[in-house]
Amino acid sequence: MFVLFGVAGLLLASFLVQLAVWRIAFPRSQTRALLVIFTIVPLCAAGLAVAGIHAFSMSPADATRLILAYVAFTLSYAVIYSAIEHQSPALSIITQVAEAEPEGCRTADLEARFAEDNPITDRIGIMVRGAWLSSSHDVITLTPAGETYAKIFEYAAGFVGIADGG
């Protein structure tokens, strides 16, 4: 039970720190900031525990369970966050129609509004701001950070048996 409460407490603390950081200064690279925050918070908690502020004893098996569960939840959250950091087309349509109430929104207005939106262009912009890609003269290249992430993704895909290209 301690592992469950420990993971929940660390996740809650990490999330609260994320909210505070986002309110103070919205990071350029949200994914990197998430990973840093979700790494620093448990390290600080462990440091405080070792310093004796909240001494507790945990078996090596429980410590392993806590670490594995926390890392799994953290990486899952980072993946989910990257998927929702940009508003989905369905949610954009709902928002547009809701803003037009009570008279509603004409189909032509929706089509005109979303003809300009390109999710790929938006995602590329997010990745450029996050320093994963660079764009020069309509040519997109990986930055050193992007190359690192690409290698991680390639390794993970190979590890779970996903062939190149899908």
Image (cartoon, rainbow, N blue to C red):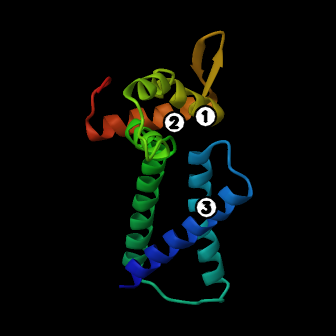
- Helix or strand or loop: what does disc 3 sit on? helix
Of 124 and 102, which appears nearest the observer?
102
Q: Looking at the image, is mark 1 or mark 3 earlier in the sequence?
A: 3
Residue name at image x 43 percent, y 42 percent: 103
Q: Which residue is mark 1?
A: 145
| Image coordinates for residue 75, horizontal then vertical, percent | 44, 54
Of the residues shown, which amino acid type is indicated by label 3?
Answer: Gln
Position of 37 with respect to 63 (left or right) is: right
Q: Which residue is mark 3?
A: 18
Residue name at image x 47 percent, y 32 percent: 151
Q: Of circles 1 and 3, which is in front? A: 3
Residue name at image x 65 percent, y 80 percent: 48
**Residue 40 in view, yes or no:** no
Of the residues shown, which amino acid type is indicated by label 1?
Answer: Ala
Instruction: Locate the N terminus and report the quarter of the image it occupies.
Output: bottom left
Rendered position, 7 above or below 157: below
- Helix or strand or loop: what does disc 1 sit on? helix
Q: Looking at the image, is mark 3 or mark 2 earlier in the sequence?
A: 3
Q: Of circles 3 and 2, which is in front? A: 3
